């Protein structure tokens, strides 16, 4: 079953710039309940209609949290995909365990931006809002990297 989130433009007050290139992985925003977001990036999409996105959500809190919904200014819909073997499937939500992290990375689980309103280009930032079961939404400024960007080498 597909959920269709509303396409209301997000108000980007307090948006926080993140960089996945160089520096530490610990940069990120903390929004109350011990959640922080780091290592966010979007490879410049090859497609005119779809793009992938990656990030790590760290939960320093003693209670588990759930990523329930993702929205973005550039996409009509953002879904969360699980990679299972060679195929990917849409997930209704993803768990962020207490004292743990949710890792969305190339080759694994990822965000899928669909119905792109414009094609993000390398060097831009794309605002993404992460919605949780308990914590108030966190806005991430996701930098757009080259189509072949590898976070392990930074290139
Ligand atoms: Cu996917």
Image (spheres, grey):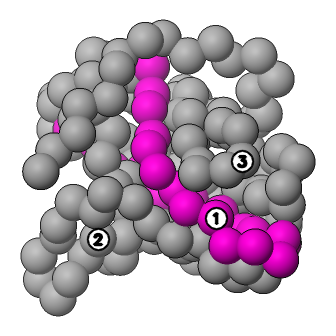
Disc with the residue nearer the chain's start (1 vs 2) = 1
Q: CA distance from mark 1 to mark 2?
A: 18 Å
Q: Position of residue 73 (x, y in %)?
A: 45, 19
Residue 155 can be seen, yes or no: no
Question: Viewer-proximal residue, 110 or 25?
Answer: 110
Residue 59 can be seen, yes or no: yes
Give the numbered dot on residue 82. 2
Per the rendered image, the range of residues in magenta is: 50-73
Discs 2/3, front: 3
Give the numbered dot on residue 135. 3
| In the image: residue 63, left or right of residue 155 | right
Q: Disc 1 designates what residue?
A: 65
Q: Position of residue 109 (x, y in %)?
A: 37, 70
Q: CA distance from mark 2 to mark 3?
A: 22 Å
State yes or no: residue 61 in magenta: yes
Say few, some or many: other residues with alpha carbon within 10 Å of mark 2 (under 14 / 14 to 19 / 20 or more): many
State yes or no: residue 103 in magenta: no
């Amino acid at each position: 079953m597909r959920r269709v989130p509303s396409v209301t433009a997000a108000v980007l007050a307090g948006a926080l710039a993140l960089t996945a290139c160089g520096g530490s992985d610990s940069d990120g925003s903390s929004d109350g309940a011990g959640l922080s977001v780091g290592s966010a990036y979007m490879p410049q999409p090859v497609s005119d209609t779809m793009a992938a996105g990656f990030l790590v959500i760290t939960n320093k809190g003693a209670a588990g949290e759930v990523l329930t919904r993702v929205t973005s200014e550039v996409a009509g819909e953002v879904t969360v995909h699980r990679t299972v073997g060679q195929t990917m499937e849409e997930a209704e939500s993803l768990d962020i365990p207490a004292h743990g992290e949710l890792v969305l990375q190339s080759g694994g689980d990822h965000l899928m931006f669909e119905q792109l309103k414009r094609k993000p280009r390398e060097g831009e930032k794309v605002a993404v809002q992460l919605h949780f079961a308990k914590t108030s939404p966190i806005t991430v400024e996701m930098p757009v990297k080259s189509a072949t960007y590898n976070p392990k080498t930074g290139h």
